[in-house]
Image (cartoon, rainbow, N blue to C red):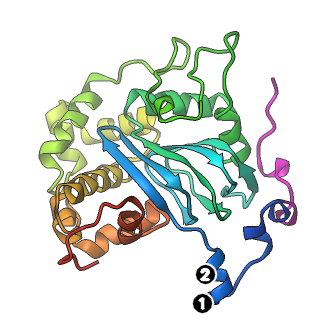
Amino acid sequence: MSITTGASACPPAAAAASQSGQERRPHRAGSQSGQARRPHWQGSATAVPGLLAFTGAIGSAEPHAHAAVQVLLVLDGEVTLTDRHDCRRPAQAAIIPAGVRHGLRAAPGTHGLLAYLDPAGPAGRAATARIAASGDADAVSTWQAAARPVTAAGPGAPAVVPGPAATYRTAGPHTGTGALPVPLSRALAAVPQLIDGPLLLGDLAARAGVSASRLGHLFAEHLHLPYPAWRRWARLLHAVEQVRAGATLTEAAHAAGFADSAHLTRTCRAMFGITPSQALAATGWNAPARSSR
């Protein structure tokens, strides 16, 4: 089956906008009618090693790029995705690669699942392999193609189905997601002990028994991310765990190696398109009142 990808395959912005009332009727900031129509994030979240998942009402997010592989499943309503080519497409399902800038606009009343997979884990590597087999990783059409279910006669990659269990599917024998190199596995295993400090690549390399440059190449080759981007993702996940355990955003930021809560807020907005406060309000993970943000 041939797959058309790239900016040339994208419908004009006006055509994409006509399929969504949210896109078709822009509103001025602060208008009452616009605020009434603007969808908000509201649901429940799960955080376990290698996975951060959100289920519920989907809101919109500013253009951003996170260091995780994102799986999107829309159960009702409509989400419009925008890629770096400024191509906009309504999407019911998509797998978005780590490190790729994209925007998300949800129509009012949209519900679904968003799962953020650690690119170092088997599910994240399986999802990345599906994207690589589907075309241009920067194109929204490729993200949609990667999420299409695979029939029994198709490749051994996992099918994406409407349900959280899909995020735990492992890859088949032809997806290129074998075991990580030993030095990279050793470096990843050392991260929890160093997360509250500088978490320098050289320190991890020393524990892994390789040079810093070699370890940096392994991150790029196997996780498809430069090390600094993966480190921001690891810090953000650790901060989430701290907030769930009762820490304020400031305490969580320091425990995860951020300079302060403002640093955490900037990183969260850059990776998810929303602030930590918005994320906490959406999931019900309310930080203690003494938090500064």
Residue 92: in magenta span = no
Q: Position of residue 181 (x, y in %)?
A: 32, 23
Q: Residue at x 26, y 41 (%)?
A: 212
Question: Do labels 2 and 1 touch, CB within 8 Å?
Answer: yes
In this orientation, does residue 75 appear? yes
Relative to the observer, which residue lies in front, 145 or 176? Answer: 145
Q: Which residues are magenta?
A: 1-15
Relative to the observer, which residue lies in front, 97 or 26? Answer: 26
- Give residue 253's quadrant in the image: bottom left
Q: Position of residue 111 (x, y in %)?
A: 58, 52
The answer to whether 94 is drawn above or below residue 87 in the figure is: above
The residue type indicated by label 2 comes to Gln
Task: Please rate how many residues cluster around mark 2, counting C-alpha atoms within 10 Å: few if below 14, some from 14 to 19, many from 20.
Answer: few
Magenta stretch: helix, strand or loop mostly: loop
Badge number at residue 35:
2
- Residue identified by numbered label 1: 30
The answer to whether 87 is drawn above or below residue 193 in the figure is: below
Residue 10: in magenta span = yes
